[in-house]
């Protein structure tokens, strides 16, 4: 691909994570702030009030009077909470909050330029998890270890965060990201379709076993094939087995990561997925990676051909309209399915990603069969969270703001309403016996109880799984993932075979490593994943 085309695709990728499907337009609505327009058109977001948890400071006793905190965030639903909290923060501290809401294509380049040049214009960024490689390796972030637990600041507990997403909040043994959004991908399915006696009988006749929530990728493939080409919402139009967002730059690489995890990671291989930790040679061409990509290419046949040009918002619309039986994506879809206009509320089931019964152990160069189903949890996505610039002129006031966003009472509403792009990941988001929360906040947000119970169980199991997908956080992660995304699109669209697509990805990975410095990359890779 020509360099200028790569640059254009990179700009699209920089939109980052889930919120890329929720790009805003127009000025901030203030007051009161409301969810901004998204590329999802089938449903309308609910209006929910966010609790104020801090009283105004007394005159002459405001802890940060005269200080200013400047935060850069993506101009999308993910920064809605910052708009909402501005008045409360300023009244409680005496400080001024300036929020710079940058288009997705500008956020990372702007903050990393500010840090690299040590300008200090921005005190904080609501950053994507994979940005830490560039930020920490460059020495640009301030750890909040000295502030955490200090009674001068709003209280929150990192121990409330489930194991998978908790790992993303620290780097090299130091805390950098303050909990906010917790991304991971699960399998969504139409509960009504899987429980329909007519479909159960026809599926058994076709495949020789009972139709149920797929536990393995082989079962998932069969179910997707079965439902493809049937009318799934009663409108007389033939619908699809699956919907995925495969537009270049729409982060299809996250779907690949979540799906391929159980083909590569297993009991004898907990981390070897991206690179050899000794040589930084790419591992992306392994037989496990190849089998996973071959499956994705096959699944594409059972979705709308148009999805090759769809972003996540358009793909979610297809599911929300009742036109797909399955989807593999983030928590946003489960919440969107509860909103007015959804045709699948009350029938949106969720479960962890299916697994495999064998995986390819890269170190042993062989396939390994497992006694049970090999499941791998994931935190794929952005997992947006606040980080403090090392060049901040008001680091304590900045941490105060980020800790306020992490407040339990606020986080409960953020996770339940869905329109802000903030997904659950802390113990109080989940129901007993796994968690400590209750169903009340979700019912208040309009959730169907069966849907929310499936949803929360799926994410709790995903984030608590002993085996977790190794999240890449090294300098140049943008570039590595861009290369993977583009070549996956080529395979999905038939321009390259799966093997050729992975070969091209490996070549690009090696070029990026050479450009950034092999030893530097090796050190960052080993630090980030604990080799």
Image (tube, rainbow, N blue to C red):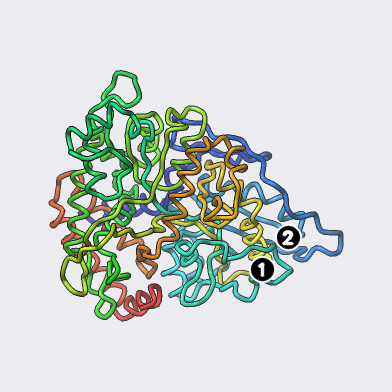
Q: Is residue 438 visible?
A: yes
Is the Cβ of the residue at disc 1 closer than 8 Å to that at disc 2? Answer: yes
Is 475 left, or right, of 216 in this rendering? Answer: right
Is 437 left, or right, of 338 in this rendering? Answer: right
Of the image marks 1 and 2, the number of the one nearer the N terminus: 2
**Residue plotted at (24% across, 45% down):** 219
Residue 484, percent from left and from top: 26, 57
Q: Residue furthest top?
A: 236
Q: Which mark is residue 394?
A: 1
Q: Nearer the viewer, residue 449 or 328?
A: 449
**Residue plotted at (27% across, 72% down):** 268
Residue 170, percent from left and from top: 50, 70
- What residue is shown with label 2? 95
Local secondary structure at mark 2: loop
Q: Which mark is residue 76?
A: none
**Residue plotted at (63% across, 56% down):** 405
Residue 362 figure quarter? bottom left
Is 14 left, or right, of 488 in this rendering? Answer: right
Count the marks: how many?
2
* Rendered position, 10 above or below 269: above
* Rendered position, 132 above or below 425: below
Badge 1 crowding class, 10 Å Cα cut-off, few under 14, some 14 to 19, many 20 or more, is: some
Residue 56, percent from left and from top: 80, 55
Real-space Cα separation, disc 1 to disc 2, in angstroms: 10 Å
Is 396 left, or right, of 209 in this rendering? Answer: right
Badge 2 crowding class, 10 Å Cα cut-off, few under 14, some 14 to 19, many 20 or more, is: many
Residue 140, percent from left and from top: 50, 72
Q: Nearer the viewer, residue 447 or 316?
A: 447
């Amino acid at each position: 691909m020509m360099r200028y085309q790569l640059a254009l695709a990179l700009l699209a990728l920089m939109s980052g994570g889930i919120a890329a499907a929720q790009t805003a337009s127009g000025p901030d609505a203030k007051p009161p702030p409301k969810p901004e327009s998204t590329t999802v058109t089938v449903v309308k977001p609910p209006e929910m009030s966010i609790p104020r948890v801090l009283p105004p400071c007394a005159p002459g006793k405001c802890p940060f009077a005269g200080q200013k905190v400047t935060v850069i965030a993506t101009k999308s639903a993910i920064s809605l909470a910052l708009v909402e909290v501005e008045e409360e923060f300023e009244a409680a501290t005496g400080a001024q909050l300036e929020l710079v809401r940058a288009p997705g294509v500008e956020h990372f380049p702007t903050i990393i330029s500010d840090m690299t040049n040590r300008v200090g214009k921005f005190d904080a960024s609501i950053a994507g998890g994979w940005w830490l490689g560039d930020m920490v390796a460059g020495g640009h972030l301030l750890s909040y270890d000295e502030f955490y637990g200090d009674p001068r600041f709003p209280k929150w507990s990192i121990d409330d965060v489930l194991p998978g997403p908790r790992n993303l909040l620290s780097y090299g043994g130091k805390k950098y990201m303050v909990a906010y959004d917790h991304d991971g991908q699960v399998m969504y399915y139409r509960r009504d379709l899987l429980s329909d006696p007519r479909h159960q009988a026809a599926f058994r006749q076709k495949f020789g076993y009972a139709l149920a929530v797929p536990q393995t990728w082989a079962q998932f493939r069969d179910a997707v094939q079965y439902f493809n080409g049937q009318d799934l919402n009663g409108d007389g139009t033939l619908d699809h087995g699956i919907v995925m967002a495969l537009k270049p730059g729409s982060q299809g690489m996250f779907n690949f990561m979540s799906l391929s995890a159980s083909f590569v990671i297993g009991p004898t291989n907990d981390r070897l997925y991206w690179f050899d930790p000794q040589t930084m040679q790419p591992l992306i061409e392994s037989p496990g990676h190849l089998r996973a990509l071959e499956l994705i290419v096959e699944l594409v046949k059972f979705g709308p051909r148009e999805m090759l040009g769809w972003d996540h918002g358009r793909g979610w619309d297809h599911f929300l309209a009742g036109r797909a039986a399955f989807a593999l994506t983030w928590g946003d879809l489960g919440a969107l399915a509860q909103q007015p206009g959804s045709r699948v509320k009350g029938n949106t089931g969720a479960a962890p990603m299916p697994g495999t019964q064998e995986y390819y152990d890269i170190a042993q160069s062989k396939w390994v069969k497992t006694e049970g189903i090999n499941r791998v949890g994931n935190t794929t996505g952005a997992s947006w969270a606040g980080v403090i610039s090392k060049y901040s002129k008001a680091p304590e006031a900045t941490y105060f703001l980020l800790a306020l966003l992490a407040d339990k009472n606020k986080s409960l509403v953020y996770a339940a309403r869905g329109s802000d792009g903030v997904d659950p990941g802390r113990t109080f988001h989940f129901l007993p016996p796994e968690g400590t929360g209750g169903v009340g906040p979700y019912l208040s947000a309009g959730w169907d109880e069966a849907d929310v119970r499936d949803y929360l169980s799926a994410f709790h199991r995903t984030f608590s799984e002993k085996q977790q997908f190794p999240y890449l956080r090294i300098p140049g992660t943008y570039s590595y993932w861009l290369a993977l995304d583009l070549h996956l699109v080529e395979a999905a669209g038939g321009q390259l075979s799966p093997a050729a697509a992975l070969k091209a990805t490996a070549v690009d990975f090696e070029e990026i490593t050479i450009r950034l410095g092999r030893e530097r990359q090796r050190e960052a890779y080993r630090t980030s994943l604990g080799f």
